[in-house]
Image (cartoon, rainbow, N blue to C red):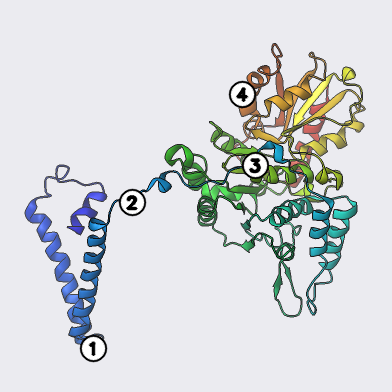
C-alpha cells in the first residue's frame, strides 16, 4: 500500500489514470517485493549478511512499526492545546524602559579588555577592543559597540541571546569581534560570555553560506525559544534572497496561517556604497510588501543608540513578531553616526526622529524625510547648499508599522506649506517610496487632522537591478541625488 500512497502523493488517483487498475496496483507492489528479495539474496550470496541477519532486520522493522502503531492507537488523547497556543513569556510593557545604568555599561567595557592569563590577543585587534571599552565609558560609541551593549545588557538581565550568520563572530566588515581568537593557540574567547555568574546564555556562531537553511533554522529556534533574542545576520542584505521561501511562508505569514509566533531578528546589511548590485540593497521594497496586520516590523536605524533601544524594545516591549533591520556598512565607521554614553543611560526607542539642529522651525521651507545612512549624507551636504536653517532632515527609523504618530509630532513643528521630499538611496521603483507614498499620508492625517502630507520622491532612476555596477556611475548618481534633494 505504501507504493499506492506514494503514487497518489505525486498527484495521481485511480480516477485520473484509466490505466491505474486494481491488478496494476498489485503488480507494482509485487515488483517492489521482487526487487527487495533479489537484493537480499545478492547480499546473502556475497556473504555480506547471513539469512538470520536478514530475517532479524525484517523482524525488527516490523516490530517497530507495530509498536508505534499500537502506541498511537491505544494512547489516551492528550491535551494538545499547548501545540496550538505555545507559551509566550509576557512582555514587560512600555513602562519598563530601555535605558541601562552606567554600571552595566562598565561591565560590558571590562569584559572586552580583561582576558584569561596566557591568552594572546592579536596586536591589531587589542587596540580596537581597548578603544571600544574607552568609548563605552567616555564616548563616542559606534554601531558595533552599541549592538554589543544591547546584547550584553540583556544577558546581564538573564535573557538568552543567540547571534548567528555569515562571518558574524568577527563581523563581515571587521566591526564586531564578538569572538576573539588567541593568536598562538587559535582558541576562541567570547567576552560577552564573561559578564557575570548569573547572566543569560550567549551563543554566537558563523553559519554556512546557505541562507535558506540558516535562516530557516533560526526561525525555528526563535519559535522554540520565545524568551530568547534570536538574530540571524546576512553577509550582505541581498543574500537574504536565497531564503525568500522562509520569508514568505514562515516569517511573514506563520502567525496568520498557524498562530505560530516568532521573534526572530534579521540583520541585513544595506547601503549604497558603490559595491555593485549584489552588495547594495536588502530589498526593502520586498519586505514592505509582506507587511500587513502588524505581522512584522521593518526598521532602518541611523544611530547606534537607536539600534540599541530598538533591540531592547523588541525584547521587552513589542509582542512576539519578526523584525527586519537594515543594518549599515559605511555608517559603521561614520564619525557623524555615533552616540554618547548618555544616549544609553537615558532615552528610548524613537521610530521617527526629528532634526535637533533646527532652532527656528518657523524658518523651515523644506523637509527631507529619509532613513538610514542617507541621513548623514544629507546632513553633510546641507551646509554646502547653504540651507542650514531652511531645510529640516527627519529620519524614519522604522518603516513599518508606520511611525505615523511620531512623524506627525515632528511635522507639526514646521509650517504646513513646507516642501516635503522623501529621499532614498534606492532606485525610484524600489526602496520604501511606493509603500510610504501609498500609506503614510493617510496614517499621518489620523494624528494631524486636515494635514496634507504631499511628498515627492528624490531617488535614483528606476532600474531592474538594485544598483549600477560601476563605481564611477554610482558616484555620479550619488552627487545628483544630493543635488536634487536640495535644489529649488
Label whose residue precedes the other's in the sequence (1 or 3): 1
- Number of the front mark, 4 or 2: 2
- Number of the front mark, 4 or 1: 4
Residue 281 in view = no
Mark 1 to mark 2 CA distance (whole Å): 48 Å
297 versus 192 height, above or below: above
Mark 1, other Cα within 10 Å: few <14 / some 14–19 / many ≥20: few
Left or right of 450: which side holds 101? Answer: right
Label 4, on which residue? 439
Residue 214's disc is none
Label 3, on which residue? 92
Label 2, on which residue? 78
Label whose residue precedes the other's in the sequence (4 or 2): 2
Left or right of 421: which side holds 92? Answer: left
Counting from the top left corner in percent of width and height, residue 435 is at 61, 28
Mark 3 to mark 2 CA distance (whole Å): 32 Å
* Res. 148 image quadrant: bottom right
- Give the structural element (helix, strand or loop) at label 4: helix
Q: Nearer the viewer, residue 93 or 120?
A: 93
Label 1, on which residue? 47
Label whose residue precedes the other's in the sequence (1 or 2): 1
Mark 3 to mark 4 CA distance (whole Å): 30 Å
Q: Residue at x 73, y 38 (%)?
A: 349
Amino acid at each position: 500500500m505504501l507504493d499506492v500512497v506514494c503514487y497518489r502523493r505525486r498527484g495521481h488517483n485511480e480516477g485520473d489514470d484509466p490505466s491505474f487498475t486494481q491488478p496494476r496496483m498489485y503488480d507494482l507492489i509485487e515488483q517492489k517485493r521482487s526487487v527487495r528479495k533479489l537484493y537480499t539474496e545478492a547480499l546473502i550470496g556475497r556473504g555480506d549478511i547471513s539469512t538470520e541477519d536478514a530475517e532479524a532486520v525484517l523482524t525488527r522493522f516490523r516490530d517497530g512499526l507495530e509498536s508505534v502503531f499500537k502506541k498511537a492507537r491505544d494512547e489516551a488523547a492528550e491535551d494538545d492545546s499547548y501545540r496550538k497556543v505555545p507559551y509566550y513569556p509576557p512582555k514587560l510593557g512600555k513602562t519598563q524602559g530601555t535605558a541601562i545604568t552606567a554600571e552595566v555599561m562598565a561591565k560590558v567595557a571590562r569584559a572586552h579588555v580583561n582576558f584569561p592569563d596566557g591568552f594572546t590577543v592579536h596586536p591589531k585587534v587589542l587596540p580596537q577592543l581597548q578603544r571600544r571599552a574607552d568609548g563605552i565609558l567616555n564616548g563616542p560609541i559606534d554601531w558595533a559597540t552599541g549592538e554589543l551593549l544591547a546584547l550584553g545588557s540583556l544577558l546581564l538581565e538573564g535573557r538568552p541571546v543567540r547571534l548567528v550568520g555569515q562571518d558574524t563572530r568577527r563581523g563581515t566588515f571587521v566591526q564586531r569581534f564578538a569572538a576573539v581568537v588567541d593568536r598562538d593557540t587559535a582558541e576562541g574567547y567570547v567576552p560577552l560570555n564573561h559578564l557575570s555568574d548569573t547572566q543569560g546564555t550567549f551563543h554566537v556562531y558563523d553559519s554556512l553560506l546557505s541562507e535558506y537553511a540558516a535562516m530557516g533554522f533560526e526561525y525555528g529556534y526563535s519559535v522554540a525559544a520565545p524568551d530568547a533574542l534570536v538574530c540571524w545576520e546576512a553577509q550582505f542584505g541581498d543574500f537574504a534572497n536565497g531564503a525568500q521561501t522562509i520569508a514568505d511562508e514562515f516569517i511573514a505569514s506563520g502567525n496568520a496561517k498557524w498562530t505560530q509566533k516568532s521573534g526572530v531578528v534579521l540583520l541585513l546589511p544595506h547601503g549604497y556604497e558603490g559595491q555593485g548590485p549584489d552588495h547594495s540593497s536588502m530589498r526593502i521594497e520586498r519586505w514592505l510588501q509582506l507587511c500587513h496586520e502588524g505581522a512584522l516590523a521593518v526598521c532602518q536605524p541611523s544611530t547606534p543608540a537607536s539600534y540599541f533601544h530598538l533591540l531592547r524594545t523588541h525584547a521587552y516591549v513589542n509582542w512576539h513578531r519578526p523584525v527586519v533591520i537594515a543594518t549599515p556598512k559605511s555608517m559603521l565607521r561614520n564619525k557623524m553616526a555615533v552616540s554618547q554614553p548618555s544616549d544609553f543611560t537615558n532615552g528610548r526607542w524613537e521610530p521617527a526622529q526629528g532634526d535637533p539642529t533646527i532652532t527656528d522651525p518657523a524658518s523651515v521651507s523644506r523637509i527631507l524625510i529619509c532613513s538610514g545612512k542617507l541621513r548623514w549624507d544629507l546632513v553633510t551636504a546641507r551646509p554646502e547648499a547653504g540651507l542650514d536653517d531652511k531645510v529640516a532632515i527627519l529620519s524614519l527609523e522604522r518603516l513599518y508599522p508606520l511611525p505615523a504618530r511620531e512623524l506627525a509630532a515632528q511635522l507639526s513643528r514646521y509650517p504646513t506649506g513646507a516642501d516635503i521630499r522623501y529621499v532614498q538611496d534606492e532606485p525610484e521603483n524600489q526602496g520604501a517610496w511606493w509603500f510610504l507614498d501609498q500609506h503614510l499620508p493617510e496614517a499621518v492625517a489620523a494624528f494631524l487632522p486636515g494635514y496634507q502630507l504631499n511628498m515627492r520622491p528624490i531617488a535614483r532612476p528606476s532600474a531592474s537591478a538594485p544598483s549600477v555596477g560601476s563605481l564611477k556611475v554610482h558616484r555620479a548618481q550619488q552627487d545628483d541625488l544630493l543635488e536634487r534633494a536640495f535644489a529649488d
